[in-house]
Amino acid sequence: MQAQLRQLPSVDKLLQNDQLAPLTEIHGRVLVVDAIRTVLDLARQRIMAGQSMQPAAALVEAILARLSVTVRPSLQPVINATGVIIHTNLGRALLSQRAQQAMLQVASTYSNLEYDLEAGARGSRYTHAADLLCRLTGAEAAVVVNNNAGAVILALSALAKDKEVIISRSQLVEIGGGFRIPEIMAQSGAHLVEVGTTNRTYRQDFEQVIDLQRTGLLLSVHYSNYQIIGFTTQPTLAELAELAQSYHLPFMEDLGSGTLLDTVPFGLAHEPTIQESLAAGVDLVTASGDKLLGGPQAGLILGRAALIEQIKKHPLIRALRVDKITLAALQATLLAYLEGKATIEIPVWRMIAADLATLTRRAQNWRRALRSLSQFANLPLQVVDSVSTVGGGSLPGQTLPTKALTVTVPSVDALAAQLRQADPPVIARIDNGQLLLDPRTVLPEQDKALVAALEYALTTAK
């Protein structure tokens, strides 16, 4: 054992290795030395545990692998083959090329983020997307914060702190990540007043509890990630807007996904748009920027100018403000809508609008590419009917018909695990004991990488 320990190369000797020496210039001496020491420590532990000493070449390979892991960012691109378009765990909406270019442009040079070019004086970051949002939705004013949860808590804090907020019992929602309306309301300093029952609420339920000394606002929350069906009743937005107006109270709606396009022409159920809510008389609408809008993570607050001004003066807005890169991406995304190019440019809408013939052809191309490799000539590969979903808490229960490639192997879990170790990783779906890959959420330029990842995973899976 002592003889083997003495035979281990020193740190200095390994630093002179032809494969390791150049890496000190690329990654810095400190990181390379750290990787060498870690591998040598592990080698000593193995020897002291009675195992044979590894050859020098194996030590070098281990050092290279350790260094590769150290310098690889934990946040990395993946291929989404699940068929879930707005996949919360995989980064939600993909940004358009126009949005990406806008982000790069403002990130690589100075910008007029808070500078009024016409006046030659300090300006406001909140002007940059506001005009576009107002033009697209008909809102009097708008402000953008970091996400929709931030938008809700900011609006409630600014407009209803120490006041009562009236909401239907059926709308006390929880979305992913533990975002619960009652807890958000408590955090804002507002007091929850729930009315009606789980399945049936009426306008008079709201009216009976309004107290002009205590009531701050009426609140409606869109059922973004669940449905209530059967023996149900809810007052319309127009009814609640008229009620709020008659008592000179603000009426606010948390719309969640916040689409600007009608989803019905794409074979989906109708998802309420921001424009519709404002047209119905809602005073203040909050929505997400990175769901059906197809832009960056952001919280949009739109509505009456007087309320928006009140919100902009609240101290919490500074803690929730967006940076120049988010604003650049949001502006570029909104311009695509303004020019009528959303379904052409914005990936979320391109995926929703993808036709079945194209999806079928791509899945068949994947199968053909794998079958062309001799070792997979007889592998059970099928192109089957399946369904995609919008995801992201949008359109619950709604699906889009798709075609998918299925792979049948003895251990589908092992194959899925190996796909996640590919470069880039591929996230697939397991359905009825088969691995399923949906082309709807795989970018066309990722097709070759997907096939290469499948080849790697099928070869290495145990």
Image (cartoon, rainbow, N blue to C red):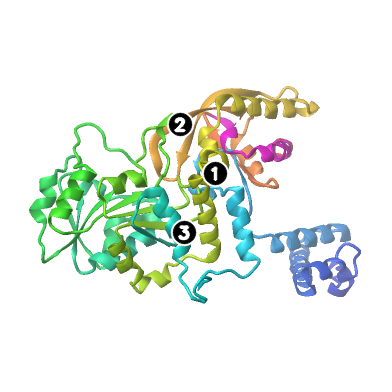
Farthest-out residue, bottom = 121
Residue 97 shown left or right of residue 7 in the figure: left
- Residue sitting nearer the eye, 414 or 55: 414
What is the three-letter code of the residue carrying label 3?
Ala
Q: Quadrant of the C terminus?
A: top right
Real-space CA distance between mark 2 and mark 1, rounded to the nearest whole angstrom: 15 Å
Query: Residue 457 falls in which quadrant of the image?
Result: top right
Q: Which mark is residue 129?
A: 3
Crowding around mark 1 (Cα neighbors within 10 Å: few <14, some 14 to 19, many 20+) is many
Asked whether the viewer can see residue 394, the reply is yes
Q: Position of residue 218 (x, y in %)?
A: 20, 55
Q: Which mark is residue 346?
A: 1
Q: Is residue 90 above or below residue 413?
A: below
Magenta stretch?
A: 433-457
What is the three-letter code of the residue carrying label 2?
Phe
What is the three-letter code of the residue carrying label 1?
Ile
At 65% from the left edge and 37% from the top edge, which residue is drawn?
444
Q: Position of residue 144 (x, y in %)?
A: 42, 61
- Residue sitting nearer the eye, 249 or 60: 249
